[in-house]
Image (cartoon, rainbow, N blue to C red):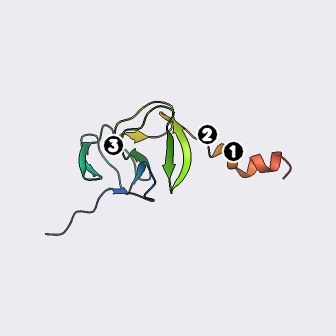
Amino acid sequence: MKDEISPLILLAEEDNVLVCRFPIRAGQLLSIDGVTVTAGADIDTGHKLARRALAAGEIVYKYGAPIGSMTEGVEAGGHVHLHNMKSDYIASHTRQTISEDGK
């Protein structure tokens, strides 16, 4: 029997989110760090899921770097996206911000 490919990718060990390799459907069982969780919503390819429970205000790490912070808490396996996260780290590092500062 062929091993099943995980629908989730961990990009860096420091990350507290996983990235979907292909779509996940609500109710689907997922293995995250050896623990089985149930997906609470449909989540498209490329979107993020919480690797563990994340609290409101907690920094979100992807690629080992901060990409934002949680606006509300989410359980392990929960969708981490614009509805519960703000990208307060990305906005300060854009090309437009640098150009406006004249640097």
Question: Residue 46 placed where, x, y %?
Answer: 44, 53
What residue does disc 3 label? 77
- For mark 1, does the 10 Å Cα neighbourhood hold few (<14), some (14 to 19), or many (20 or more) residues? few
In the rendered picture of this protein, how many numbered marks are placed on residues?
A: 3
Image quarter for residue 100? top right
Q: Is tag 2's residue or tag 3's residue first in the polypeptide sequence?
A: 3
On the picture, is 48 further left or further right than 88?
Answer: left
Secondary structure at badge 2 equals: loop
Secondary structure at badge 3 equals: loop
Residue positioned 35% across, 36% down in the render: 75
**Relative to the observer, which residue lies in front, 22 or 32?**
32
Q: Amino acid at mark 2?
A: Asp
Q: Tell me the CA gap for discs 1 and 2.
A: 7 Å
Query: In the displayed structure, would residue 75 be above or below residue 51?
Result: above
Point out which mark residue 88 bears. 2
On the picture, is 71 further left or further right than 95?
Answer: left
